[in-house]
Image (cartoon, helix red, strand yellow):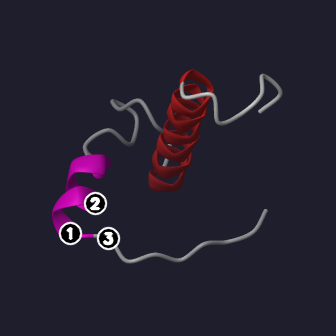
Amino acid sequence: MPKVSLDMPRELKIDLEQHVGDDGKFVSLADAIRTACRKMLDHLDEIDLRAGRRGGDA
C-alpha cells in the first residue's frame, strides 16, 4: 500500500483523534483518514452520476 504524507491543521487532527481508539469508531488515525476519503469519493461519484458526468460503472 502506498504511503501518503500530508499537512493538516492541528485542530482537525485533534478532532479526528477523538474518534480513534478503544472507545472510538476507528482503530487508527490512518483508518479514519482512509474512511473519510472513501466516503468523500463515494459522495463525489453520486454527484457526478446525478449530473450526468459519469456512467453507472464508476
Report which residue position mark 3 lands on: 8
Distance in Å between CA atoms under marks 1 and 2: 5 Å
Q: Residue furthest right?
A: 57
What residue is shown at x 35% (from left), y 32% (from top)? 24
As helix, strand or loop, the secondary structure at mark 3 comes to loop
What residue is shown at x 52% (from left), y 34% (from top)? 39
Q: Position of residue 22 (x, y in %)?
A: 40, 34
Q: Position of residue 37 (x, y in %)?
A: 53, 46
**Extent of the magenta region:** 9-17
Mark 2 or mark 3: which is in front? 3
Marks 1 & 3, CB-CB < 8 Å contact = yes
**Depth order, front residue of 52/38:** 52
As helix, strand or loop, the secondary structure at mark 1 comes to helix
* Disc sitting over residue 10 in the figure: 1
What residue is shown at x 62% (from left), y 26% (from top)? 49
Q: Position of residue 48 (x, y in %)?
A: 58, 33
Marks 2 & 3, CB-CB < 8 Å contact = yes
Quadrant in which the C terminus appears: top right
Is the magenta region chiefly helix, strand or loop? helix
| 32 in the magenta segment | no
* Disc sitting over residue 13 in the figure: 2
Going by the image, does 44 lie left or right of 55? left
Amino acid at circle 2: Lys
Quadrant in which the N terminus appears: bottom right
Q: Residues within 10 Å of mark 2 (few under 14, many from 20)?
A: few
As helix, strand or loop, the secondary structure at mark 2 comes to helix
